[in-house]
Amino acid sequence: MPESTLAENQLIARAVEALRELPEVEAELHHREPLGKHGGGIHDVQITLRVAGKFFVLMVETRKTVFPRDVHQVIWRLRVFWQLRAVRHERLTEQGGKPLPFLVAESISPGAKELLRSERIGYYDSGGSLYLPAPGAYFYIDKPPPKILEKSVRTLFTGRRAQVLHTLLMQHQNWFGVTDLARQAKVSPATVSQVLTELERFDWLEVRGQGPSKERHLREPAALLDAWAKHIAATRPPSLRRYYVPGTKADALMVRIGEVFDARAVEYAITHEVAAQYYAPFLSTVSQVRVRVLIGANIDAAITDLGARVVNDGANLAIIETRSPGELLFREQVSGLWLASPIQIYLDLLQGEGRAREMAEHFRKERIRF
């Protein structure tokens, strides 16, 4: 038996077991044969259900992965072929069983699940999520995405791929070709192509043109930023180098940082609460300045020039070490100081303490606006 068919069989068997674990549900698997040369490669799989005395027939289609862009095709195929299946197996449906389309997949993205639910299409994935809308019976179990999907999504928000996302979010009104986007994100065209392929699967992009003139536009910036925020929430905050600069309040300390870092040619971007205050005031006072700094030979000399000393508690300066200039993308000079981009400030606030998360939502609403 081919490996793909074996994996399909195992996944369907797990779906049947999940159905059997539901209260007052009996499930039985029927048939495993091609629908014929006009079946488009679909195999005929049916699961008969008895739910609290009622009889249903699930007409099953299997997929490996399903993203939002796949859903419309999946729905069409399910609705067309479940009718064919119902006719072929009248002995099941003539008993009074209502035929229902049902998708079984190794992984279904959250956006795809939402679309399937809106169309009342049942589904099961290997993470254990299950949705079954039936007349007089309704089951909905939502579990974290399976690891295969989590890994795919997680890699989008790290390293050079994150620079592509950052560029798209900062310029979400614009259309980009691969080469232009690669130049602005400071990455290779190959990296851009990989990221765009992933984003298209989530149906977040709009596409126009063909071949070398093909361009994309980020149609769903809020959805992308929501997904990045969710990733950040599950990620350990970056380590900080904490210092205390004597006799200096936050506003004066920022000015001093700008003077010293510029004199020492240190590349930096002020972030977190003190930067957010510049764009969208929220807190009455801010006691600490947090700065993203490109690590190099001059940083230690700059810290010495500031008169800063290392502390564990009571820090008024925190340094976030960055290894690549790409991590300072879209910083902006305001009143002589380099501030991180609004997107970076928002993401950094999500990993802050105290009222930082509350400030993040205010900042997103007032400054980012999607």
Image (cartoon, helix red, strand yellow):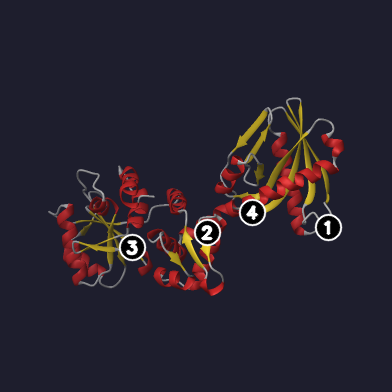
Q: Which of marks 4 and 2 is nearer the N terminus?
A: 4
Instruction: Judge depth for marks 3 and 2 and give the one in front.
Output: 2
**Circle 2: residue type:** Leu
Check residue 65 in the rendering and tell me which mark sits there, or answer none. Answer: 4
Within 10 Å of disc 1 (Cα), the crowding (few <14, some 14-19, many 20+) is few
Nearer the observer, 303 or 339: 339
Question: Of helix, strand and loop, which one carries label 1?
Answer: loop
* Distance of label 3 from label 2 (alpha carbons): 29 Å
Q: Earlier in the sequence, mark 2 or mark 1?
A: 1
Q: Residue furthest front?
A: 209
Q: How crowded is mark 4: few (under 14 residues within 10 Å), some or many (20 or more)?
A: some
Q: What residue type is labelled 1?
A: Lys
Crowding around mark 2 (Cα neighbors within 10 Å: few <14, some 14 to 19, many 20+) is many
Task: Measuring from the top left, give residue 206's x and y in whole percent.
Answer: 51, 59
Position of residue 91 in the picture relative to residue 143 (left or right): right
Give the residue number, with chain letter if any, for mark 1: 37
Closer to us: 348 or 48: 48
How many angstroms separate mark 4 from mark 3 (CA)? Answer: 37 Å
335 horizontally vs 88: left or right: left
Q: Residue at x 52, y 65 (%)?
A: 208
Residue 267 occupies which quadrant of the picture?
A: bottom left
Give the mark, 4 or 3, whose residue is nearer the N terminus: 4
From this view, report whether residue 268 is shown above or below residue 122: below
- Between the residue at mark 1 and the residue at mark 4, the CA separation in whole angstroms equals 24 Å
Q: How far apart are marks 4 and 2 (CA)?
A: 14 Å
For this orientation, the residue located farthest to the left is: 247
